[in-house]
Image (cartoon, rainbow, N blue to C red):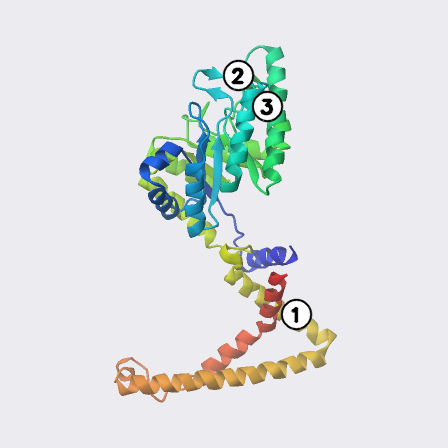
Amino acid sequence: MLTRVLMTSISTILLATPACATDVGVFAWGSTIRSEGVQKFTDDILSTGYTEVAVLIRGVSTPTRVDTLSAVYSHIKARDPNVKVYAWIVGFERKDGWDKPWDPEARREILDAVRSALPYCDGVILDDSFRYPTSDPVKRAKAMQAITDLVREISELVHSHGKVVYFCILPEKPEPYSIDRDAIATYVDKFIVEAYTEEYGRDDEWPVRVYKLYERLYPGKVAIALHELNESRLAHQLTLLKEAGCPDVWLFRYGEVKRMELVRDVIRSITESASGTSQWGPVGGGQFDLSGLLLTGLVLGTFGGLALSIVNPELLSSLGQAAIGIAEITLELLQGAFEAVSGALSGMGILEKVSGASAEGDLSPVIGILARAALVFVWGLLLATLLSIG
């Protein structure tokens, strides 16, 4: 923990550009994935730059099936373990109406869907159909308690497996839908607010306003979902959310977005820029960000050397002598390699063709400066590496 905090702080100070990564996810129907083929779907998800994907396993009119989720999970994780795969589950809305949230059979089916998905996902996304529209105050109170209890039970189950629960909501007032939003917020890891209702069609700033409102209500637990058939508007909304600092944006849905090349370009630019920032954090295979590690080595080496010169100058002197010895050996090796390469190139007449080049050129001053400059933070780099192992 100390190492990660240190790395983030150092990167922020030295680069003056604090990392502000934005994840971009997409909702996908299982039938769409099957018709396209899991391999082709995986190729498209990764090439577009999505960092997360939700696969529908229980729909309004379809029973639970996890074979598509399982296939997508195995294919994506084999190629990029950092991309998250979620099980998307529809709640009480059915093709012929709404199940009662307190109905034992409906609750059992939902819990069974969650259990069956857990081996093949990074978490569960509960659809906005985990609600119950009614104007009857008695039924509303009963449904509200039943929904909250079910979400709590799902969260406990999913969290016991070290995975996350997201809850989709409409941006309207929750009471008509029998949702106790504040209570549910205590159980789920994130709200995905579907900012494509109410005033969504009025202007492209609406999703940003929704994000800012919900971020004030539930700090650090808000993602925004977009659904727009106009390609340029969707791309613009996505860009505005990134600029507003929204950390997580979801697109509904894959079958439509995959034909929007402009939107796909925006997704790539967002996720590639995020992955290119220097920040401390584990990456695939248990490795760590190299640029961040070097920055930590630089700062620890510089300030640590200053501190050591005050606390124990004799030890610093010993380390300095050792460093000089290493530098001299490195210099000899590099100079020997240079001379060998220079001789070979000279024999081929290449050096003479390069302006200012000479077979007798001496790079030792440059190499010496670089070698000694690098050694300023070598011990700090080693210390950072040891800390990362811990």
Residue 304 badge: 1
Quadrant of the image occupied by residue 310: bottom right
Label 2 crowd (10 A; few <14 / some 14-19 / many >=20):
some
* Residue type of the residue flagged with mark 3: Ile
Residue positioned 51% across, 62% down in the render: 291
* Residue type of the residue flagged with mark 2: Pro
Residue 372 higher or lower than 212, as above or below:
below
Considering the image in quadrants, where does the C terminus appear? bottom right
Residue 160 higher or lower than 288, as above or below:
above
Asked whether residue 286 appears in the rendered view, the answer is yes
- The front one of 8 and 96 is 96
> Which circle, 2 or 3, is nearer the viewer?
3
Q: Position of residue 153 (x, y in %)?
A: 62, 30
Q: Position of residue 258 (x, y in %)?
A: 34, 38
- The front one of 189 and 368 is 189
Distance from label 2 to label 3 (Cα)?
12 Å
Of the residues under marks 3 and 1, which one precedes in the sequence? 3
Distance from label 1 to label 2 (Cα)?
63 Å
> Which circle, 1 or 2, is nearer the viewer?
2
Of the residues under marks 2 and 3, which one precedes in the sequence? 2
- The front one of 1 and 109 is 109
Residue 133 badge: 2
Residue 147 badge: 3
